[in-house]
Amino acid sequence: MMHVADNLGRAPFRIMVTSLNAFMMSPHEWLAWNSDYPRRVLRHFIGIHLTPSPKEDAKETMCDACNTSPELLTRDGESRRGFLTAGAAAAVAAPLAATGFVGAARAQDAQDANALAESQVQSWAAFDTDGSFAPHTITRRAAGPKDVVVEIMYSSICHSDIHTYKGDWGPAVYPLVPGHEMVGRVVAVGSDVIKFREGDFAGVGTMVDSCGECANCLADREQNCLNGTTFTYGSEDKISGGVTYGGYSKKIVVKEEFALRIPPGVDLAGFAPLLCAGITTFSPINHWDLKPGQRYGVIGMGGLGHLAVKLAVAKGAEVVVFTTSEDKIADAKEFGATEAYLWSDEEALAQQAMSFDLMISTVPVAYDMQSFLNMLKLDKTLVNVGALFEVQGAQGMMMAFNRQSLAGSMTGGIAETQAVIDFAADHGVAATYEMITPDQIGEACQKVVNKEARYRYVIDMTAA
Ligand SMILES: [Zn+2]
Ligand SMILES: [Zn+2]
């Protein structure tokens, strides 16, 4: 059980929580865990003990690597470790030295150290509220023992990126490097990383750090950290100082706990939007427990909304879409919705009164919500994930008559984000997207504002 917790990359105080999660591992997680087991055994008994780091005590390093005590892992205590160390060292070191392997290993060590060092990284930044993006060089910190270095392959444009550089949620710090939906390849791992190895695919979403100790973090709600979540861009960087820089860049260094495993064989570009849009729409489905056959209303079908449809359809719900774009009616049905209506179709909207078990609003601007609240059944909820402004048009009396709730929700925790990635892989769900190159970011953002995106713009970072 300790090894399961290890693989999830949690701190010791979270072992009990993550051990419970382990019982609910998806097939992907079990595969990852099992395939990773021999490597972790080698790390504990050969890798670390035979070649102790010159700067750290080997026993301490082992404890950090596994997030638990050596006794818990070996059950035999110091003597068994000593036996393994001495015996395996004698067996392995002599032939390796004779073949020149040691020299090659040193060269590899130097290469690894280089990959972990602080680096200057190409990015694309907004310099003002206009969103005219330009190349900009940023510094990524040296990777620590528990960090992974990810070469970003695909980064998608979320409407939050646009709200942020425009200053809609408060003044931005420029140059601003947005991007919190990214997928790439792990190119280096710190000495204590156990969740990834070089060559794995990894994703980074809306956050890169949290305290790990508060009640919300301990409940896998890192996005609601009581001591302040570090968001992926434009947030105070508590590790390096300054502000965080997001995924409109070619590389990111991140704690392994905040990197998500992306299963091999999936559409990597289509999975990038799952890191924000996917989890933002999946979390309400989980929290309000949408069940197969229940009627689920999706208000607005852009980047978030189209994933809300696909994920709810995969859950077996009966999905109904409300859109302002006529051409999206056919798309909604293609994504699996049973019905789709234009907001302007007042007659059709009136017929939906008190018919929904759950609704989600993904519209990124404020609007009169009461006409949709009227569509909820008794005691049901409309979850607003799009318009993070003053809520307009909710009528207390109207809501009281049917005890309707209007709720907010923001992204999801790391465990829940991994769950949506695995769920999407298992059910063949991915975003519908158009690929662009980094020099097209500004133009694409304008198209998002003009509702022209179908349905996400994914920036091909390998094209620069
Ligand atoms: Zn987002
Ligand atoms: Zn916290």
Image (cartoon, rainbow, N blue to C red):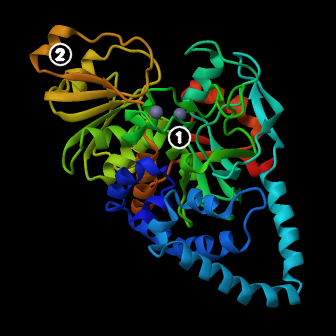
The answer to whether 128 appears left or right of 412 in the picture is: right
Residue depth check, mark 2 versus mark 1: number of the one nearer the observer: 2
Q: Is residue 364 visible?
A: yes
> What is the number of the mark on residue 399?
2
Find disc 1 in the rendering and name its residue: 455
The answer to whether 181 appears left or right of 347 in the picture is: right
Name, please, the residue furthest toward the front.
79
Residue 186, above or below 350 = below
Q: Position of residue 355 (x, y in %)?
A: 16, 33
Q: Quadrant of the N terminus?
A: bottom left
Residue type at mark 2 is: Met
Image point 67% across, 69% down: which residue? 48
Depth check: give the residue in front, 280 or 50: 50
Q: Secondary structure at mark 2?
A: helix
Residue 141, above or below 57 = above
Q: Is residue 195 visible?
A: no
The quadrant holding residue 388 is: top left
